[in-house]
Amino acid sequence: MGTALVTGASAGLGRAFAEELARRGHGLVLVARNRDQLEELAERLRREYAVTTEVLVADLADRAQTERVADRLRDTGRPVDLLVNNAGFGLRGSFSRGDVTEEERALDVMVRAVLVLSHAAAGAMRTRGRGGILNVSSVASFAVMGSYSAIKSWVTVFSEALAVELQGTGVHVTAVCPGFVHTEFHDRARMNMSALPEQLWLEVDQVVTTALRDLDAGRAVSVPSATYKLVTAGIRVLPRSAVRRVSGLLAQRRRTSR
C-alpha cells in the first residue's frame, strides 16, 4: 500500500487520517509538534495494524523544521506515496485588533508549509509516475470568514492548479473542504460553537473516507456531505456582495453567542 506522510497527525482530522490509512495497510510518517502524542499514536498503530510507523517532530511554522519534512518527502530511498497536508489551527477575533504574529504563524503553517511540502512531494511523485497529495482546506474557502477564509481559499485554488499541472502524470491532487467537524479544533481556538445546529456538524470518519475516495477518483475538490455540497454550490452562484453580507451576519451571530 505504500507510505503516507500526515502533518498535524497528533489530533483531530490528522489523527483520523492516520488511523484510516493504517487500517488500509499504509506505512506512516507522523508529523506534529508533540513527540509524546506522536509516539503513543505510532506505537498503537504498529500494534493494531502491523504497519511501519515513523515519528517526525516538527513545527511547520519554523522554516528549518519544515525543510526537514520536505527532505523526507524527497527521499528516493524511502518513497512517500501519499502526502496529507492537514496541519492547521483556527483563528478567532478581529484581524485589525488581534495579534499579527498569530496571523503570520497561520500563513506559515497553512500556506507556506503546504506549498513547500507539496513541491517536495510533487517532484518526487512525478518522477516515479504515481502518488497523491491531499490538502485539507475548508468550506470557509468559498466564503468570507476573516483571514482564515483567505488562507483556505489559497489552499483550494492552489490544489486545483496543481491538479491541472499534474494531469496525466499519475499523481492526483485533491483539496478536501469540510464544514464544521466534531474535533477539538474549535475548542483549541476558544470558539464557542454552541449555537451551531447539529445538522451542520460532520464526523471525522465521514470527512476522511470521502476525502480519500475523491482523491482516488481524481477529483480536485472534495466536499463531504450533501449539506455542504449544497452550501458551496449556493455560495458559488451568489454575487460576492451577497456572500459578504451573509458571512458578516454569521460572524456577528457567533460574536453575540459567546
Image (cartoon, rainbow, N blue to C red):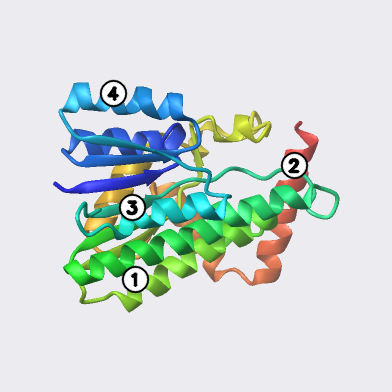
Q: Answer with mark 1 or mark 3, whichever residue precedes in sequence.
A: 3
Residue 253 - label: 2
Residue located 48% across and 53% down the image: 66
Depth check, front residue: 75 or 233? 75
Residue 1 position (above or below residue 244)? above
Q: Answer with mark 4 or mark 3, whichever residue precedes in sequence.
A: 4
Depth check, front residue: 67 or 103? 67
Measure how far apart labels 1 and 2 are at the Cα level: 36 Å
Q: What element carries label 3?
A: helix
Residue 43 - label: 4
- Amino acid under label 4? Glu
Task: Return the x and y of residue 245 as percentages of the image width and height.
Answer: 73, 60
**Which mark is in front, 2 or 3?**
3
Q: Answer with mark 2 or mark 3, whichever residue precedes in sequence.
A: 3
Q: In the drawing, does residue 127 fall left or right of residue 240?
A: left
Residue 4 position (above or below residue 233)? above
Q: Can residue 220 be seen in this view?
A: yes
Task: Return the x and y of residue 202 as percentages of the image width and height.
Answer: 44, 37
